[in-house]
């Protein structure tokens, strides 16, 4: 083990993730400010939560007038998948104390998980704690700095464009979901069922709870439909 | 104040699932359906977040949201970067706001 070298190669391996995060984080920062969050609130959310989809979800639910409890419950369910990812990453970590692993688990996202668990098959190298730390820190920096840049950039965006920003939020969700739907009929069914459930639930529940309930039930239908692969 | 409460709550709701396996890894053994349920949640959540909320992007004019959403949906076929898809939907919406 060579800590500085491992750390640097972690940074190198993680930089494509950081580059991917920056524009999305800019969009998040801009949308958060448009929604009425202060710059410090938007940046703090990225600093402490570090989970893209749920941060966009929070902004959209705040906009819909959802309560804090509704938003936190929805966040819990959306990010529950990190439980499985964390198990895989911990199995992959070749060394490190519980304290190290506790700290590193904060950096688990869809992207860092994918890179950490897939790379060993490619590189044939051990995944050390310093490598993991480098990879996560560079990805995290991209997310936090991008958010800050987005908060600042919103001040120079003309009003005509900022009026269209709300659709940007939906385009973000569609941009995440669409490619998966084209690839998998099961994912398409899950998404469409959740949409319809949400439309039904919205007629007698608050929008926040309708989204939470539609997510849980739509995913349950997905679990029943899914074969071996997701 | 409400936003800070949301941030604190979201931090806990996100960090706990990330951190639990460090301590309970050996004791965890999930049934297959539970894993599939977890894997399905993000798709279900995205679906619920998109519809029917997108219809109310502009008050009393559901067509505006539908146009923006369709532009984004069609562009997902071409494997474009998500920021390009967002920009195109925003432009399409601004144009249709001015025409409709």
Image (tube, helix red, strand yellow):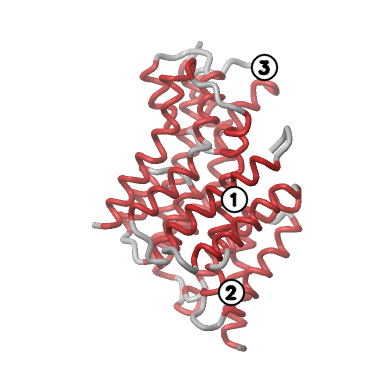
Q: Is residue A126 visible?
A: yes
Crowding at label 3, few (<14), some or many (≥20) Cα neighbours within 10 Å? Answer: few
**Residue nearest the viewer, comparing A142 with A74:** A74
For residue A103, side relative to residue B30 (left or right): left
Q: Position of residue A227 (x, y in %)?
A: 73, 36
Circles 3, 1 touching at the beta carbon (< 8 Å)? no
Residue, disc 2: B65
Crowding at label 2, few (<14), some or many (≥20) Cα neighbours within 10 Å? Answer: many
Q: CA distance from mark 2 to mark 1?
A: 23 Å
**Residue nearest the viewer, comparing B52 with A92:** B52
Chain under disc 2: B
Residue A121 versus residue A50 in the image, above or below: above
The reply to the same-chain question for discs 3 and 2 is no
Q: CA distance from mark 3 to mark 2?
A: 48 Å
Dividing the picture into quadrants, the one containing residue A207 is: bottom left
Q: Secondary structure at mark 1?
A: helix
Residue A124: which disc?
3
Q: Position of residue A78 (x, y in %)?
A: 50, 45
Residue A218: which disc?
1
């Amino acid at each position: 083990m060579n800590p500085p070298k491992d750390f640097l190669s972690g940074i190198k391996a993680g930089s494509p993730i950081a580059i991917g995060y920056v524009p999305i984080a800019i969009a998040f920062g801009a949308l958060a400010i448009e929604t009425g969050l202060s710059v410090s609130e938007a940046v703090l959310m990225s600093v402490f939560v570090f989970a893209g989809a749920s941060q966009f979800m929070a902004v959209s639910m705040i906009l819909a007038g959802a309560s804090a409890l509704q938003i936190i419950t929805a966040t819990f369910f959306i990010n529950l998948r990190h439980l499985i990812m964390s198990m895989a990453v911990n199995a992959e970590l070749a060394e490190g104390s519980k304290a190290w692993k506790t700290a590193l688990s904060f950096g688990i996202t869809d992207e860092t998980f994918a890179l950490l668990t897939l790379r060993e098959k490619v590189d044939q190298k051990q995944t050390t704690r310093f490598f993991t730390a480098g990879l996560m820190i560079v990805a995290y920096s991209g997310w936090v700095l991008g958010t800050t840049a987005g908060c600042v950039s919103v001040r120079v965006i003309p009003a005509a464009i900022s009026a269209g920003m709300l659709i940007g939020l939906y385009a973000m969700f569609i941009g995440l979901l669409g490619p998966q739907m084209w690839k998998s009929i099961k994912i398409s069914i899950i998404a469409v069922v959740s949409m319809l459930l949400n439309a039904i639930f919205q007629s007698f529940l608050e929008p926040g709870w309708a989204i939470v309930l539609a997510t849980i039930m739509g995913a349950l239908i997905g679990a029943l439909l899914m074969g071996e692969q997701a | 104040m409400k936003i800070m409460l949301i941030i604190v709550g979201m931090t806990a709701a996100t960090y706990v699932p990330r951190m639990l396996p460090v301590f309970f890894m050996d004791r965890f053994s999930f049934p297959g359906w539970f894993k599939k349920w977890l894997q399905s949640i993000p798709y279900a959540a995205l679906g619920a977040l998109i519809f029917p909320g997108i219809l109310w992007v502009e008050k009393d004019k559901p067509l505006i949201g539908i146009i923006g959403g369709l532009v984004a949906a069609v562009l997902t076929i071409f494997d474009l970067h998500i920021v390009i898809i967002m920009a195109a939907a925003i432009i399409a919406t601004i144009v249709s706001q001015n025409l409709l």
